[in-house]
Amino acid sequence: MSALIENLRRICGDANVLTHDDPSTDLSAWERDWRKRAQGRALAVVRPANVQEVAAVVKACANTFTSIVPQGGNTGLVVGSVPDASGQQVVLSLQRMNQIRSVDAANLTVIAEAGCILQNVQAHVDRAGFLFPLSLAAEGSCTLGGNLGTNAGGTQVVRFGNTRELCLGLEVVTARGEIWHGLSGLRKDNTGYDLRNLMIGSEGTLGIITAACMKLYPKPAAQLTTWAAVPSMQAAVDLLGLAHERLGAGLTGFEVMGQFALSLVNKHHPQLRVPLYKDTAYCVLLENSDHESEEHARHGFEGLMETAMDKGWVTDAVVAESLTQAQVLWQIRETIPLAQADEGLNIKHDISVPVSRIPQFVAETDALLQAKIPGIRLVNFGHLGDGNLHYNVQAPNGTDGAAFLRDYEDTVNTWVFDQVKAFEGSISAEHGVGSLKADKLAHYKDPTALAMMKAIKQALDPQNIMNPGRVIKI
């Protein structure tokens, strides 16, 4: 492999090809996943600066049958962007490709490279007077390429859709090291197969996304945030229906949070002062973006809450009176995963179920797990507006977390995923498949769909060098 390493150094420069040969070099940031579930060993970490260098790196690896693991911010939750333990895989880090190439005000688009941190894209277009609505907890460290590779969701999917719905064009390096120049800002292009959507959500298994043309939106005239206590999941679903009816496209966020999930935030991050959660089963966070005025937005919210309280769907509510207060409420929601980690090791689920069936799913699955494992604690929260729950499982009090995962993780996953299948849902809503769920697809994915996916993988990556073992196993 020394010849390959030398070739990679000629392509990207010595400083941008990192190996274990140098004892002073620590590659753990690229080799360990965010949740510390997996620790691999890379042959090299390569950091190209532009699409031409990416293409040259892929060609060099293809010539030596060396597999490539594309990586952005390495914030994924399904072990899809770190190398295996063989020491034979090249990690291709896109972090140096972090330029925003252009903003087209008339076309309402931005072209940004895959290594751009999501928060930086948001800030750049905000200064230009626009909104880029993709927003999620890891936005300060995740990258646009990773968001596209996993088809990330976040808190505003109810209005703007997942990352796929925000993308108009891509620049991609194929498994053969060829460059697809597809950065069109067209909203209509009916000239064949939708290659863009094929690449989005493929987790680097079909090609490497190096840049994207993304949709922008006008900034709203006013944005109001309400935190409401609801007595049940059914009440939350009823409130969501009323919010759609009253607010229409102005409803940009609708998050649900269970009492235990919020109690963990209150326990481990008391400075956030979680409101209203102690006497209710769930709390809901609603966001209304109004393009008319703050007065119009507030009038709509007040009418919504009045009707919801009359119907018993809301028992109490607070409306953020400033942007700072709104940010604190959203921070509480985004802190739930951190608070759960503070509580100890846990089993994470990123599932989707038709919104209308979520109350029954939660009731039945809660009862099933509590009967199977007395004392089990359920950290239930997520994006109710689009049917995506983070239905997580915490060990009973006093139980060693590592032992709980060792003894129960596979079994709990099966119980939950079987329930998801019974309710016609998906075992991965926004986090992707990675390696953690790749073995599960054979049981939970339609067999015809799975066969089509394998055929596409074999056609576009016949050597199986692009992130092998992730999403689809060949």
Image (tube, rainbow, N blue to C red):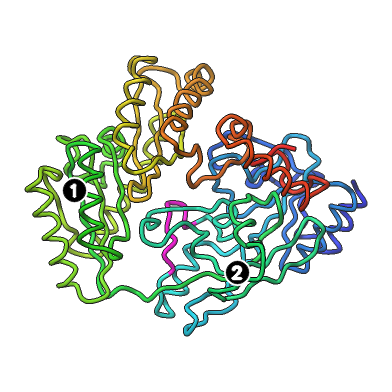
Along the line of sight, the residue nearer the viewer: 235 or 436: 235
x, y percent for residue 214: 53, 69
The span picked out in magenta is 132-140
Residue at position x 20%, y 53% in the image: 242
Q: Which residue is labeled 1 in the image?
A: 228
Assess whether residue 138 is covered by the magenta stretch. yes
Q: Which residue is labeled 2 in the image?
A: 169
**Residue 12 showing in the rendered view:** no
Dot 2 or dot 1, earlier in sequence: 2
Q: Is residue 230 left or right of residue 130?
A: left
Disc 2 marks a residue whose amino acid type is: Gly
Numbered mark located on residue 319 in the image: none
Q: Is residue 150 left or right of residue 377?
A: right
Mark whose residue sits in front, 2 or 1: 2
As drawn, which residue projects farthest toward the left? 310
Residue at position x 76%, y 62% in the image: 54
Alpha carbon distance from label 2 to label 1: 39 Å
As drawn, which residue projects farthest toward the right? 3
Along the line of sight, the residue nearer the viewer: 51 or 183: 183
Give SS at disc 2.
Answer: strand
Along the line of sight, the residue nearer the viewer: 448 or 350: 448
Q: Vertical placement of 389 versus 156: above or below? A: above
Quadrant where the C terminus sits is top right
x, y percent for residue 57: 81, 59
Give SS at disc 1.
Answer: strand
Q: Residues within 10 Å of mark 1 (few under 14, many from 20)?
A: many
x, y percent for residue 132: 44, 68
